[in-house]
Image (cartoon, grey):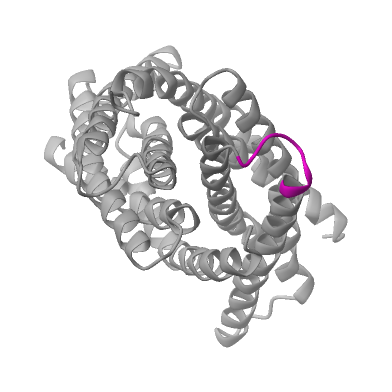
Amino acid sequence: MNTRRILYETVPVLILCGMVELLAGANLSRMESLLESLPGLLIMVPPMLDLRGDINGAFAARLSSGIHLGVIDFKRRGEIWENLKAVLFLSVVVPTLIALFSYSVCYLLSMHSIALPELLFIAVCTGLVSSAIMSVLSVTITYASVSRGIDPDNVAIPVLATLGDFVVVVLLFVFAMVVA
Amino acid sequence: MKYYNARRIIREELSVDVLSIAIGVFGGLLLNGRVESFITLPILLAYVPIINGIGGNVLSVFGSRLGSALHLGYARGFDRETSKNMALFVLIAIITFSIAALVLYVSNHVSGESMSFRIAFIPVLAGVMLVGSLLPLTVLLGLVAYRLGLDPDNVVISLMTTVADFSGIVFLLLSMRLMGV
């Protein structure tokens, strides 16, 4: 364990991501509350944000482990494709579940919600497009850190989590506008 | 023969994702509004995303490193090496939260409001307690996942960020009490 290297690589990124979240937080939460004013989306927004972090965090963690193990490199792409297949599948199935879940909760609590097909459209489109964007970013950021001699475990997930929040909120907004 | 298999990744991740969504939604519905009502100063409520955000990031980096270490056979249990790693990540949390709090403190004073140093210190205390208490849990989850034959990368980080989202506000309340606010 190289203490100094871990400190040098993690702390600047963690601080930078914290600052971005701090600055963007106000705007993001304003956009979120605008989104949540669409009936039914109130329940859907937080899990959609969690989901992006879960799927892409795990993908980035696997990329890093794969590189350390020597089973993933950026020239032979088979292992990366296998990972991407799983990411895409999860990015369709889990948003579908989130939409169904949100709709059921609204129904059970007799809260007003937009129609189920509209919820499904917003969730699945956001899931698919965000997973495409975030997957490209995951591979790029991991590749960039490896080629600079930085351990991807130290930097990839915080950067991706910070960018992912933006991407998801903006996409939810865009697809909600399409529906509304 | 490929090392990674899409089916396996989906099988291992799906259950964890569904669990973390269910916890997130029900937790959000049942708990948050009620816990938040205990926080009397609005500025402290604004700290919650910072505590959860930075806390989640620190734990994710630790979880990602743990995943690689388990794959490579470096991490075997709660040994000396693991303890040193956990201590290092507590240090990382102290540094990161302190700098974030300092920026908040300074920007608050520049904008003409005057936040007391005690208030500014609360998120540092909450964040460091959050990270400190969840690091051993991260190691435990990683070891259990590995022993069960699961890829720790697929399950540990998602579960830990879900737990961190919950615990952030609890540690915020605790540090308010400790600082007598």
Residue B116 vs residue A109: left or right?
right
Q: Position of residue A62 (x, y in %)?
A: 40, 39
Magenta residues, as a range? B74-81
Asked if residue B39 shows in the view, the reply is no
Q: Nearer the viewer, residue A132 or B171?
A: A132
Q: Residue B93: say if magenta.
A: no
Q: Is residue B176 above or below residue B155?
A: below
* Identity of the residue drawn at 54% across and 63% down: A10
Residue B95 vs residue B60: left or right?
right
Image quadrant in which the C terminus of chain A is located: top left
* Identity of the residue drawn at 65% across and 63% down: B92
Image quadrant in which the N terminus of chain A is located: bottom right
Which residue is farthest left?
A178
* Identity of the residue drawn at 67% across and 56% down: B89
Residue B141 vs residue A42: left or right?
right
Q: Nearer the viewer, residue B114 or B89?
A: B89
Residue A147 occupies which quadrant of the picture?
bottom left
